[in-house]
């Protein structure tokens, strides 16, 4: 990269930016400058993080009320602790247990015929240990 050589007077005042700033017209503050600045400082001081708004009293009261309503609903809608299965459910469970035993026996007999296709872990899982 080629840089132009520095001017003979390499002080800060000979910099191009300082020369530009020297040509700018000074501006005086407006009549409401102090009021606007004080208002901005108050607004910055009152701006709180989201965590403070989350833990404010109003959201906590709503959260507590919701939690209480859920607990009450769970306690009132809880089924009775004594559950007697109906005869239709009992026969369906017995039929399912029979089908389950038959399926396990078929899987074990297939595994005995093809022992090389299964790992030791799979065989142990099939036996049920």
Image (cartoon, rainbow, N blue to C red):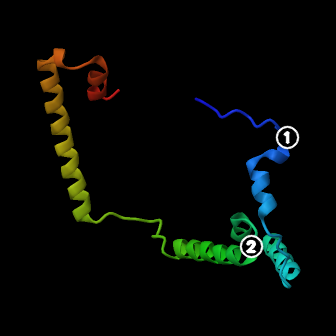
Quadrant of the drawing holding the N terminus:
top right
- Gap between marks 2 and 1, in whole Å? 57 Å
Quadrant in which residue 40 is drawn? bottom right
Expressed as whole percent of the image width and height from the top left, the position of residue 89 reads: 25, 61
Residue at 71% x, 78% y is 58
Q: Could you say which is closer to the camera, residue 53 or residue 121?
A: 53
Residue that label 1 marks: 11
Dot 2 surroundings within 10 Å: few (below 14), some, or many (20 or more)?
few
Quadrant in which residue 4 is drawn? top right
Residue at 15% x, 38% y is 102
Q: Is residue 117 left or right of residue 49?
A: left
Expressed as whole percent of the image width and height from the top left, the position of residue 107 reads: 16, 30
Q: Could you say which is closer to the camera, residue 110 or residue 54?
A: 54
Height in image: 110 above or below 66? Answer: above
Quadrant in which residue 36 is drawn? bottom right
Q: Could you say which is closer to the camera, residue 24 or residue 104?
A: 24
Expressed as whole percent of the image width and height from the top left, the position of residue 11 reads: 85, 40
Q: Nearer the viewer, mark 2 or mark 1?
A: 1
Q: Is residue 115 left or right of residue 85?
A: left
Residue at 74% x, 73% y is 56
Height in image: 30 above or below 56? Answer: below
Quadrant of the drawing holding the C terminus:
top left
Residue at 88% x, 79% y is 34
Dot 1 surroundings within 10 Å: few (below 14), some, or many (20 or more)?
few
Residue that label 2 marks: 56
């Amino acid at each position: 990269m080629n840089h132009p050589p520095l001017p003979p007077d390499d002080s800060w005042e000979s910099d191009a930016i300082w020369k530009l700033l020297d040509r700018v017209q000074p501006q005086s503050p407006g009549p409401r400058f102090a009021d606007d600045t004080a208002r901005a400082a108050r607004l910055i001081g009152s701006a709180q993080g989201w965590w403070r708004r989350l833990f404010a009293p109003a959201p906590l009261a709503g959260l507590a009320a919701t939690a209480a309503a859920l607990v009450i609903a769970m306690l009132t809608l809880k089924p009775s602790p004594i559950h007697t299965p109906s005869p239709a459910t009992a026969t369906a469970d017995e039929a399912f247990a029979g089908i389950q035993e038959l399926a396990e026996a078929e899987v074990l007999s297939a595994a005995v015929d093809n022992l090389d296709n299964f790992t030791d872990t799979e065989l142990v899982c099939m036996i049920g240990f």
